[in-house]
Amino acid sequence: MIVLTGACGFIASHLLSFLNQKGKEEIVLVDKFDNEAKLKNLEGKKYSEKVDRERFFSWFLANADQVKFVIHLGARTDTTEKNWATLQELNLDFSQNVFQLCYQENIPLIYASSAATYGAGELGYSDGLNPENLRPLNLYGVSKNEMDIWAQARANEQETPPFWAGLKFFNVYGANEYHKQKMASVIYHAHNQIKTKGEMSLFRSHREGVKDGEQQRDFVYVKDVCEIIYFLMNKRPASGLYNVGSGKARTFLSLAEATFAAMGVEKKIEWMDTPEVIRDSYQYFTQADMSKLLAAGYKRELHSLEAGVEDYVKNYLQTNRYE
């Protein structure tokens, strides 16, 4: 069986649907299951059991001989979180325990890291960088980077699962993210704003030399993320950290234009100041170096920003459809 944590969440619920389409139904879901809105993400999907996060480790020890793979996507993903104790518990301690158990029980593992670990990108965006040299801009990024540092240390001691991969997700967008509220993608918010007001808002630039809307991010469609996870599950190349992005930085203005085009609405953008609470930790550029994954044999073409946005808007947001 496959264990999938954070099962009600955005990427995990999409992955559950993807695995079902691949004929995999012996999947154990791990989450809190206390958010009625998020439970919609599980409707119509096939799985063998739901295990509450609080009792997961006792369940795991009792059933480890049946587990073939663990995909650990559960985390506190709010980049504005200021309570380190929460991030320590959910993003670091919990993840380390999962990693350690997979090592002890000889079970392969994929866990969620983040492009937030790269901070302002002073050293670039290569997954070959030593995480000890990275300087994340917020506590969320710190928690993810501390996990990567710890995992690399275990690798140096040869105390790891038979295969493990920490996935540095860049700006993932797609269906099933409605519950993320302020942390949902700009596309999700743009669609809702355009639908209700005929216009959308983007942050002004507060950096000299960068025009409004010219901030750039690596936007990656969640369907591509699922394909990459599935590839790593089956191919199991060299263990370590892997970037999961499109490999192409695009501007927020391009993203907005793609959203207007997908909705068939004339572009109308309102500019707003970047909130001060995130202004100092705002990333103005990210672009995944995907060479490591490509060298491992990944050949599937990824969605362009325009193609991904069109599919998301037309087939999910405008039809209120879940994946």
Image (cartoon, helix red, strand yellow):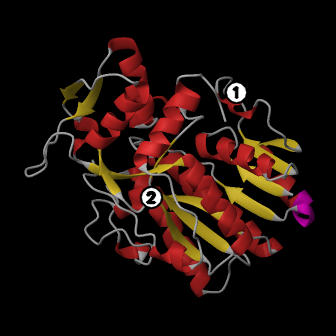
**Quick one: which residue is furthest to the left in this view?**
208
**At x 91% / y 58%, what residue is drawn?**
62
Local packing at callout 2 (Cα closer than 10 Å; few below 14, some 14-19, many 20+) is: many
Q: CA distance from mark 1 to mark 2?
A: 28 Å
What's under tag 1, amino acid-wise?
Lys
Query: Where is residue 33 shown, x and y percent of the image?
Result: 73, 33
* Residue stretch rendered in magenta on the structure: 62-66
Query: Which quarter of the picture shows residue 267?
Result: top left
Which mark, residue 40?
A: 1
Residue at which label 2 appears: 246
Query: Where is residue 90 shown, x and y percent of the image?
Result: 59, 50
What's under tag 2, amino acid-wise?
Ser
Query: Where is residue 146 shown, x and y percent of the image?
Result: 48, 65
Q: Using the image as rendered, state which of residue 294 and residue 131 is in the foreground.
A: 294
Query: Where is residue 137 shown, x and y percent of the image?
Result: 31, 55
Quadrant containing the N terminus is: bottom right
Mark 1 vs mark 2: in front? 2
